[in-house]
Amino acid sequence: MTDTVLSLRKATKLYAGVPAIEDVDFDLRRGEIHALVGENGAGKSTLTKVMAGVVTLTSGTMMVDGADVAPRTPLEARNLGIAMVFQENSLVPTMTVAQNLFLGQEKFYNRLRGIYIAAQQFLQSLNFDVTPTATVGGLGAAKKQMVEIARAVLHKAKVIIFDEPTATLTPEEKKYFFDLVRDLKKRGVSIIFISHALEEELLLADRITVLRDGKHVVTDDAAKFDRAAIVQAMVGRDLSNTLYGAKKKTVRPAGARVLTVQNLKMAPMVKNNSLSVFAGQITGVFGLVGAGRTETFKIVSGVLKRDFFHGGEILLHDKPVRYRVPAPAVKAGIAYVTEDRKVEGFFETASIARNIYLGLLSKFPKGRMILSRRETNAAGKTWTERLKVRAIGDEAKVVELSGGNQQKVVIAKSLVQEPDLIIFDEPTRGVDVGAIVEIHELINHLADEGKAVVVISSYLEIMALSDRILVSRQGKVVEEFSAIEATEEKIMYAAIH
Amino acid sequence: MIAAVREFTNRFLGRGEATITVPSFDGALKPNQKLEAATTVLQCEAPEDLATDGRNLYVADGRRLLRLEGSVATELRSFEQPISALCALKDGGIAVALGGREVRLYPDASSSEPSVTFNDAAFNAVNALAQAGDGSLIATDGSTTCGVDDWARDLMQLNRNGRVFRLDPKARSVTPLASRLGYAFGACAHSDGVLVSESWRHRLILIRNGQTPQVVLGRLPVYPSRLSKAAGGGYWLTAFTARTQLIEFVLREPAYRRRMMAEIDPAYWVAPRLRSGFSFKEPMQGAHIKTMGVIKPWAPPRSYGLVIRLSADGNPLYSLHSRVDGINHGVVAAVEMGGDLLLIAKGPGRVLKLPLAGLAEELGA
């Protein structure tokens, strides 16, 4: 048995003649954690989908334990011992943990109690603190991830591929997840790990492979990399300072107050929350998952409703407003760029242009509700060029785009509405560094234009981006920092204590 | 009928007019403790207002008019009534309002006889004076029914009868500029109009001749008071205390207020104060709890100290605070002189001095 558990040689995958990966060589050693790094569109997902049997290679070979294989379905890959834990988990939310674990292994007669006992024993053997009788829909992101991992281990996977596993986890949950991954490694499982958080890769991985534009750039021991070196390999230039670099030395002065939230309540997530947002500034809102940030701004933009009794007040340009649906908020000049782009952000089977134009149509321009093909294409072309959306063709569907480009479409869909107040909720989650820089530039440009910009983020990008930082905890803003005085420690302390 | 139903629904649901919310201190109003770090240059019995001609600093302390040099105060003269407002004039003279009912102009601070006296019958609570560009005086009169010291009653009665007057010393005439204001308290000339603080409406308005007042800065979390010009453009706006949800709630309960005003000593009303924490009889605020002799610093204040630096167009740039656990509360006057900001904290009876060098940068303005 060789030391290499899985390898690819000259792997090429073409979509409509355009290579997503080209002549990629890749080796995964037994019991190693291998980080796969690259910009969105670099080919990471395609490479891992080939391994997991989701797509097949156009040319090239794949070997598992030295034998040539070509899995055509995820089931075939699973039988080879390769499991993939997707970014959006593939569990059935209405079933229990145990039912999800044994999904696809049903027998003619299923004894539910037996399944629960087996699941309990198995989860305990992994030291996973998950109740087998709990319904998956009611679990937090970290626990769902545990169930996914447990399922992979149950299927005797020798290779587990994680695609952005930490994107939805809180810092505590991340730490727990890292321990799990290290534990799997000890059991001899090989891990492929995709994340846009480079610190995680440097912390966790044994080896790192960098892909760029579908081609293999470098593979080496993680100890030989630092953040700057990875970023340079990913994008061909040094961006680390732009992303996380030096603290802001100047802040934009506040313009007129655009939004005032006073004693807003929406039990149990938003508790007596008060804040202001000013024109010409980027207001960053930091907080851990569950701090009520998203809910507050969803209420502002009419996606959610505040409490019926004593729900507090929202003032837009000093006038009280109460939106029950998003349409009037859009008309009033509020744009909300969702954190969950795949569910709430776009129509994935519609074209880029149509998605962007739908954003405009939601404002009912001139009272119209009908799509004009000419206007659709014009708006699509303008915004695709302006935001540098990279697609195979004009008619490309949004589902075919990489995460960063999908995010740009969601942003374009909001900006086409010409809002005064733009709320970006986790604008760079699951987005590669190249696209992060472009999105940051766009956000800065909007503030320079005099727009009121809110950036909700769980990442410390907020320090590089914001003029003022509001820290949210347990449903309300508890601290405000100017960008000059803010430090990572101060922000985290306020968010936790 | 519809209005009555709407009012009932609003009260039931806590919406519309019945919403009891208070804007937050954020952005330029983010709290700090800068006023607590200010130097006390003078301790007085009843400081009321400040004025400067650029060289001299005048302090109104009860009936006495003082000149302050360093920390040495010289009494220039004394009046038969307490001074309720003070203004240094461009020609070296000084204007004083006495008891809120009379305004006198003196050719200089030590003159024995006034050059002009305005004792219009309409005056009741003149609480601030400012000189306009044409040499006339702008006076704000808080209330037609309550005297200058009885402002808490004016608030509790929800009066809206504040006025602004233009006093012309040459023609010796008094012209009303605006009326029906929610306690006019502080004025400053602003291009072709007058900026006026409306304390009970928590806003700053611009009054121009023959035009409807325009809101320059609204929905403040405080009760704004006197204004003065800042060096380098813009203004200093003082706020004598902060709004709290408890007081906002009391202001929506007429029966409670009527009974409170009839039965309770005004010192212990649920109303804003210039100082607090000195008697166990004071009303408890939500979370305003004294434990082991210490008022919890996060408690909403019954009294507060605040000065806001405004830009030339009235936007807040930064602010200086004395929080609930501080002492320099009840800030009613601020003037800039020689790179320092001089303030009156009426609560503890202090004249304070705060160097302004580097302050704007430190506070991120």
Image (cartoon, rainbow, N blue to C red):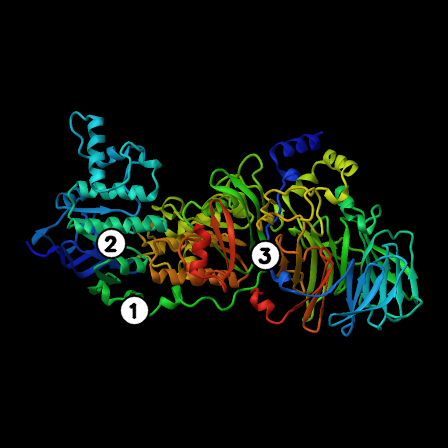
Q: Quadrant of residue B170?
A: bottom right
The residue lying toward the viewer, choosing from A477 and A216, is A477
Have a look at marks 1 and 2 and say if they share a chain: yes
Residue B58, position as x, y percentages in the image = 79, 67
Q: Amino acid at mark 1?
A: Gly
The residue lying toward the viewer, choosing from A102 and A342, is A102
Pointer 2 residue: A193
Q: Secondary structure at mark 2?
A: strand
Please identify, in this view, whether the residue under mark 1 or under mark 3 is nearer the observer.
Answer: 3
Pointer 1 residue: A236
Q: Residue reaching furthest left?
A: A1
Pointer 3 residue: B31
Q: Amino acid at mark 3?
A: Pro
**In the image, is residue A113 above or below residue B149?**
above
The residue lying toward the viewer, choosing from B265 and B94, is B265
Q: Secondary structure at mark 1?
A: loop
Is residue A462 left or right of A216 when viewed as pictured? right
Q: CA distance from mark 1 to mark 3?
A: 45 Å
